[in-house]
Image: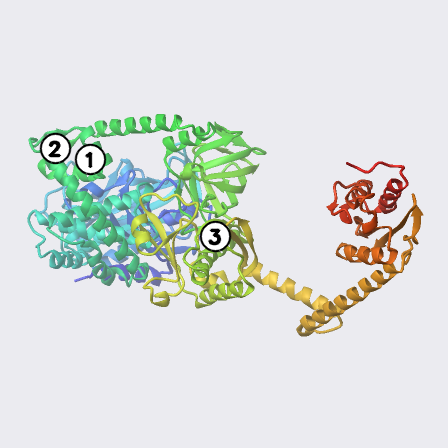
Amino acid sequence: MHSTNDIRRTFLDYFAANGHAVRPSAPLVPYNDPSLMFVNAGMVPFKNVFTGLETPPAPRATTSQKCVRAGGKHNDLDNVGYTARHLTLFEMLGNFSFGDYFKERAIELAWGLVTGEFGLDPERLLVTVYHTDDEAFDLWRKIAGLPDDRIIRIASKDNFWAMGSDGPCGPCSEIFWDHGPEIAGGPPGSPEEDGDRFVEIWNLVFMQHMQENDQIIGDLPRPSIDTGMGLERISTVLQGVHNVFDTDSFLELIQASEELTRTKAEGEQQASHRVIADHLRSTSFLIADGVLPSNEGRGYVLRRIMRRAMRHAHLLGAKEPLMHRLVPALVGEMGAAYPELPRAQALISEVLEREETRFRQTLDKGLRLLDEATDDMGEGARLPGETAFKLYDTYGFPYDLTVDALRPRGIEVDRAGFDEAMAQQKAAARAAWKGSGAAADQELWFDIAEREGSTEFTGYASTEGEGRVVALVVDGKEVDRADAGSEVVVLTNQTPFYGESGGQDGDTGTITGDKRLSIAVSDTTKPLGRLHAHHGKIESGSIAVGDTVHLKVDAERRERIKANHSATHLLHAALRNHLGEHVTQKGSLVAEDRLRFDFSHPKPLSQEEIAAIEAEVNAEIRNNEEVVTRLMTPDDAIEAGAMALFGEKYGEEVRVLSMGRQDWQGSGRNYSVELCGGTHVRATGDIGLFRIISEGAVSSGVRRIEALTGEAARRWIVNREEALKSVAATLKTVPEDVETRVAALVDERKRLEKELAETKKQLALGGGGSAQGAADEEVGGVSFSGQVLEGMNPKELRGLLDEAKKRMTSGIAAIVAVNEGRAAFAVGVTDDLVDRFDAVKLVQAGVAALGGKGGGGRADMAQGGGPDGGKAEEALAAVRAILAGEQVPAE
């Protein structure tokens, strides 16, 4: 028997031997096509190659591409488990020619594979061609030797492929396998074609025309080939079965679920086992490709698939979560072909177990309430939509599960009523929001979010991708179009651009597209916490709502931001380790050139503490541990030791970032575990280097650290080293001796300052020792000594006045000390004169002359100061005027 793994390998090896480059499967999230929720065909990853936007990876290629059809227009979810061929995840085998070979070689290769490598009986094969494609008809007759009655012309669109209303297109040719007359059904094109006798196993697309508005306008200069063969479908043929769930790959998974549930895949239980097997595959591959369960977009579809499987596990009687226990069987079956599965096995298991644990609580309650609501309903009845909405809104029971649960009983659900109830709830929420006093300019974003839904962020896995323009804003108003020179805000249905939040700066980059469009994105914000708004200027071309555009983040800038963001997590942990658990984040800034981290702490950090914190962070960086992301409820995350980051808004589920050494100091967890929706490095070693450049106070009880990482930190250290070398050269020493040399210079300066102060004091005591000083003089019958001293320390004035009073025996001394333009003024009065002259009033007169106010002390000694040292003589003159009776002292 041909195993599924052997069939895949045979296909790829065959085309490799025929000059095709074997390409790995692309992720399920199609970053090059915003119109698709998931990759749903083998050619999707090559779409831009076929349209000429990208260079082909090789002239010929072959792949086994994983595909999902469970959302949007390609949605097979409800049929899975109940039909012979519907799957949510399937593998599409394909060979591609990018302008290399065309119809003749494509048909030769196809016929050689199915009849040679796979050994299918040519007598049981027939083909279809587009009704006007005489060339393909003749080639099948020539190459395969098929008679005319087994080359069927099909006139419908089923045999003509197009990438869209605009773009490459061309006729198809399909290969069918005849299961035999014992199976009901007729050949393609006949009234009985929907039967199971004739099954399409391969579709060859001859991409040769270009069309606009669904009209062919000419031929492609380099016709190409795109083929698709469903691996599961060809496996049924080669393994002699009629149902994909009877192939070896599915039987392995079904057997595992039979063993774990102790039930057989037969009777009413058969569909449940099949649903579990299929949904295990799709959910595991989606998680491995970065999709995590959520309430919107791709994450919502993933959750729908997961919960449908989990309900069927419940129907089989599983008392404990089942899905995660099946992951090893899946990895064993498909892990060799898809290495992303074993790499993500731990994450897949964790997500499945957590989701099923939570969902079981919802499921038990919802099914009980659903039974009560439908107790008196029989087959053909219709459950009111408002009842289904109540189950969803109040008890968290999804609409899809309501439909699925009632399906075996033949009860339908009023979808229109459900949608109406949902619309009424949104209207009520909008009215409540308008009445809450929210800023008027926010209503614009509310309108867009209500109409278009949240922006899907694809930037955790990629820094570029395609998006469909859903809104344009110019000068605060929505517009349909914007042209070159305009400052515009662009909103797309999905984007790799991170919107500013949680302290992390928004991304910058470019938006390009048709019509010569080029927009320089200067910032990305996150209105309402769920839209990503790209702010930029249109440098050329124009943009309109509905356009498909290419969004490219400045990846180098993003990498620097990621390093700084991850470093804040390590810094937070280090601060708590060294300062205590009272440390919590009070704010942060994560920019491309630096990081800033505010935290609670009552006092400055010592140099020893700063050095120890910095050393610990760098130790974690050198360990180069992987940064692991998990999705959890906020309560579960915090209970598991995660710390919430300041400024983040948390919904029902949060991203939990674990980094650094595992089982840190026996705690059972990583060095750092925090709730965070930002972008981060893949491993701590990507940070490179961490350097604290400042620490200071922000407010009472809040400190701030500023730091650098990576190249910025290295440059900072190099600049400091160059400065040290320059200082050493100036001091005529080497960098290693700078500290000793500077200490010696400081000691020498202190000595010289002390000697200078002593000299000035002696000069002052000598009277008139300064060029601006004066000998004792008699003013108004009183002995007066007035001096101006440059560079004198004001603290010395009191001692100098005491010495002057002793020398004078009877009299008044006044000294002005001038330093850097300002002046200190002091007056001393001997004891015999304090009844006549008050030192405080004399000082106040002099201070006023210096441009100052006030002055104080005692009647025998007072001091003050002023800003204008240039008027020192005027201060002394003011004292003389009072002594001479020319001026009345200030009251």
The answer to whether mark 2 and mark 1 are in CB contact below 8 A is: yes
Q: Nearer the viewer, residue 213 or 337?
A: 337
The image shows residue 215 at horizontal and vertical percentages of: 39, 32
Determine whether, in the image, residue 786 is placed left or right of residue 224.
right
Q: Nearer the viewer, mark 1 or mark 3?
A: 3
The disc labelled 2 sits on which kind of residue? Ala
Residue of label 2: 373
Residue of label 3: 599
Quadrant for residue 426, please give it.
Answer: top left
Q: Is residue 113 above or below residue 300?
A: below
The answer to whether mark 3 and mark 2 are in CB contact below 8 A is: no
Q: Nearer the viewer, residue 629 or 78?
A: 629
Determine whether, in the image, residue 41 is placed left or right of residue 503.
left
Earlier-in-chain disc, 3 versus 2: 2
Q: Is residue 538 above or below residue 612?
A: above
Give the position of the N terminus as an image quadrant: bottom left
Q: CA distance from mark 2 to mark 1?
A: 10 Å
Quadrant for residue 149, please give it.
Answer: top left
Earlier-in-chain disc, 2 versus 1: 2
Residue at 82% from the left image edge and 58% from the top image edge: 803
SS type, badge 2: helix
Q: CA distance from mark 3 to mark 2?
A: 53 Å
The image shows residue 60 at horizontal and vertical percentages of: 39, 55
Q: CA distance from mark 1 to mark 3?
A: 44 Å
Question: Dot 1: few (<14), some (14–19), or many (≥20) neighbours within 10 Å?
Answer: many
Residue of label 1: 391
The disc labelled 3 sits on which kind of residue? Phe
Residue at 47% from the left image edge and 29% from the top image edge: 441
Q: Is residue 233 visible?
A: no
Determine whether, in the image, residue 124 is placed left or right of residue 284.
left
The disc labelled 1 sits on which kind of residue? Leu
